[in-house]
Amino acid sequence: MERNAFNIAIDGPAGAGKSTIARMAARRLGFIYVDTGAMYRAIALFFLRQGVPAGDEAAAGQAVAGADITIRYQDGEQQVLLNGENVSGLIRTEEVGNMASSVSAYPAVRAHLLELQRSLAAGADVIMDGRDIGTCILPDADVKIYLSASPSVRAMRRYKELKEKGEACNLAEIEQDIIERDERDRNRAVSPLRQAEDAVYVDSSEMTIEQVVEAILAEARAKGLDAGSPASGGQTAGDQAAGGPVSKSQAPGDSDAGDRERAGSDQEDAG
Ligand code: DC
C-alpha cells in the first residue's frame, strides 16, 4: 500500500507525559499533534451534561450518536468541538477524566471515534497519542512508542500541576486515582491499554522531557524520517489535513523555542 503520511503513535497510561511530549515532538517535526484522549473527554462531558450514568452501557451506546465530535487547530493547538461548541477548556477536570475512562470501555463509544482518528492520520503526518493507537487505530504506524512512568512519579507530576493551579489536592488520593484509572484502561475488553508488540517502551520516570522527545525523534529517524524536515511525500502541518472533520487556522507549531522554556516544569499529561 502506498504511504502518503508518516504516523507516530504514542500510547501509555495517564500522567506519563504523553501529551506534553507528543506536542513538542510534533512541533519539532512540523507534524500535527492529535490528542485522542480529548475526544473521549468531550464525549464524557456530553454524557455528564445529558445525565447518562457512567455505568449504563446501553444508555451510553444510544446517547453517543448525539455527540458530534470534530477537531480544529487554533494557534497550533488542537481544539475539540462537541456539537459545534469548543469544549477544550471544559474537559480537563478529574470528573470528566474519570467519566472518560469509564465510558471509553464501551465499544459503541470507541467505534464513534474510530473513523475520525483514522482519517486524521491518513491525510497528514501526525503524532497521535492515546491508549490504543499503536494496537488498534494505527496498526501500521511508522513509529510506535509506549510511554510510561511509575504511578508515584505520575501522581507527583499531577499533584504539582494541581498545586500550581491553586487547587486543593491530596497526593495519596491522586495516586490511588491513577492506579484505578490504569486498571480500568488496561482491563477493559475492547482496545485495552497495552504495548503493541512493535512499540518501543520508554519509561519517563527518570528522564527529562527533552530526553524523551529526542528518543522519539531518533526512533523516527531510524524508521526513515528525515527528522527536522517534514516527511517526504506526506502532507505536513501547513497543508490541509484529512478532508472532512479537520480544519486548521494555523500550523500546529511555529518554533520550538517555547518548548525549551516549558521543559523544566511541565511534564504532565493532562489527566
Ligand atoms: O489521555 P486522557 O487522560 O486525556 O484520556 C482520558 C481517558 O480516555 C482515558 O482514561 C482513557 C480514554 N482513552 C481511551 O480509551 N483511548 C484513547 N485512545 C485515549 C483515551
Image (tube, helix red, strand yellow):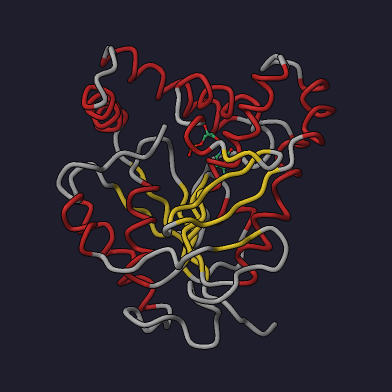
At 52% from the left edge and 75% from the top edge, which residue is drawn? 6
Q: In which quarter of the image is the N terminus?
A: bottom right
Give x and y (percent) for residue 44. 62, 28
The vertical placement of 24 against 52, above or below, is below
The image quadrant that residue 28 belongs to is bottom left
The vertical placement of 199 against 174, above or below, is below
Q: In this view, does 43 lie to the left or right of 64?
A: left
Residue nearer the viewer, 72 or 157: 72
The image quadrant that residue 124 belongs to is bottom right
The image quadrant that residue 151 belongs to is top left
At 62% from the left edge and 81% from the top edge, which residue is drawn? 3
Give x and y (percent) for residue 70. 66, 49
Q: Quadrant of the C terminus?
A: top left
Q: How many marks?
A: 0
Give x and y (percent) for residue 110. 70, 41
Image-quarter location of ligand 1:
top right
Give x and y (percent) for residue 78. 49, 52
